[in-house]
Image: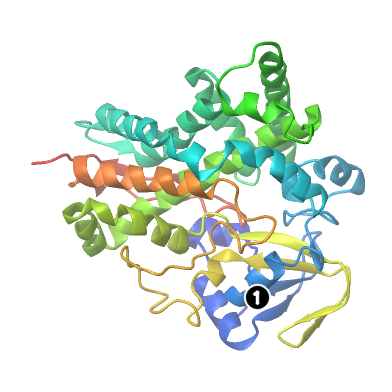
Amino acid sequence: MEIDLVDKDRYARGGVPHEQFRLLRESTPVYWHEGQDGWPDFWAITKHADVVHVSRHSDLFSSARKLALFDEMPEEQREFQRLMMLNQDPPDHTRRRSLVNRGFTPRQIGRLEEHIRDICHALVDEVQGEPEVDFVRDIAAPLPLYVICELLGAPVEDREKIFEWSNRMIGNDDPDYAEGPEEGRAAALEVYSYAHALGEARRREPRDDIVTRLLRPDEDGQTLTRDEFDLFVLLLIVAGNETTRNAASGGMLTLFEHPDQWKRLVDDPSLAATAADEIVRWVSPVNMFRRTATADTEIRGQKIAAGDKVVVFYSSANRDAEVFERPDEFDIGRDPNPQIGFGGGGAHFCLGNHLAKLELRVLFEVLAQRLPGLSQAGEARRLRSNFINGIKSLPVTPTPLP
């Protein structure tokens, strides 16, 4: 079998190359993947334990040296990108994460549950009775956008431009969203300007929202700089939108493909809690991240040289038979479920994992209760990306209770 884990057209046509990942996990879990199209060779890390190992050893596997995204960029661009937490290593990352953690504690996120439930019911109200709607555009995308506006204290009308910015940044390799990387960079600059204006407004007139909390000094008098704040908002807009949106749409498609599991959820909506974790495991909305080896090291006896590009694949790790019983079976009641769709732990474990799981749990609970006859009405269209396992559209018929 020819191994190519980064062909974007392959992801657009058929989704994650699970057969290739299975072969590598069984035969060559630390695989030297040849480069092409301007990117260098890299080590593909496909086993759960090894993804966790790389994730938890920032001293050996850096996010800052050549950044965390797969694509290469010149050093002058990397220098600015290192102001974003995604592209930092401890201790810089530790300091900045401690400042933003204040707005994302489980207690703070828990306060949003009823608001999220209201949003989900309102979204169902809007589509109920329609002959056909797009699950992505009408349900999966609006939910995190409404929540992001709530977190930022931004007008809900801004959700459309946030949606468009996010599409252009994440979908810059998909002709439906952008004509190339320049459009993605232009969208990032627009978000940066938006965040800057938002920060300036909250400094003048503080409110009871996360933005105001993030701008206040902590107990040691530390604050985010203006650039750090602006880049954090950019990260929140992308990460807070794309993960939930694509987990929700990928999860709904998976439930259509496994009607027995949809029936289980309809019969017992309390399963939405474990279903959320299983959806994240199965979909793995973020496919991969890149690290750079800082010193000569080894994984499973395979020597890795300082400077080598190391790529961890969450989609593969989440199907590892050494960790998951019946890994290729979708089971909404799976418990325990040590999925690492939000990262393998360590410094870069997803800051918003509590929020994403809350949104997914409430959404699928409401859908099971209000639209038990929900059915697929057309073919799903996938995003052309090897980074985000995304779905661009999913036609559905929103059938309510008989």
* Residue drawn where x is 65% and y is 63% of the image: 6
Label 1 crowd (10 A; few <14 / some 14-19 / many >=20)? some
Colour mapping: rainbow
* Residue drawn where x is 71% and y is 33% of the image: 188
Which quarter of the figure has residue 305? bottom right
**Residue 210 located left or right of residue 30:** left
Q: What residue type is labelled 1?
A: Asp
Pinpoint residue 93: horizontal percent, then vertical percent: 77, 49
Residue 337 vs residue 377, the one in the foreground: 337
Residue 297 vs residue 390, the one in the foreground: 297
**Residue 152 located left or right of residue 126:** right
The residue indicated by pointer 1 is 50
Pinpoint residue 358: horizontal percent, then vertical percent: 42, 45
Q: Can you name the residue that lies furthest to the right here? A: 76
**Residue 340 located left or right of residue 194:** left
* Residue drawn where x is 88% and y is 68% of the image: 307
Pinpoint residue 80: horizontal percent, then vertical percent: 85, 39
317 relative to 392, above or below: below
314 relative to 118, above or below: below
Label 1: which secondary element: helix
* Residue drawn where x is 16% and y is 55% of the image: 267
Pinpoint residue 229: horizontal percent, then vertical percent: 73, 31
Which quarter of the figure has residue 61? bottom right
The answer to whether residue 377 of the structure is visible from this angle is no
342 relative to 17, above or below: above
Quarter in which the C terminus is drawn:
top left
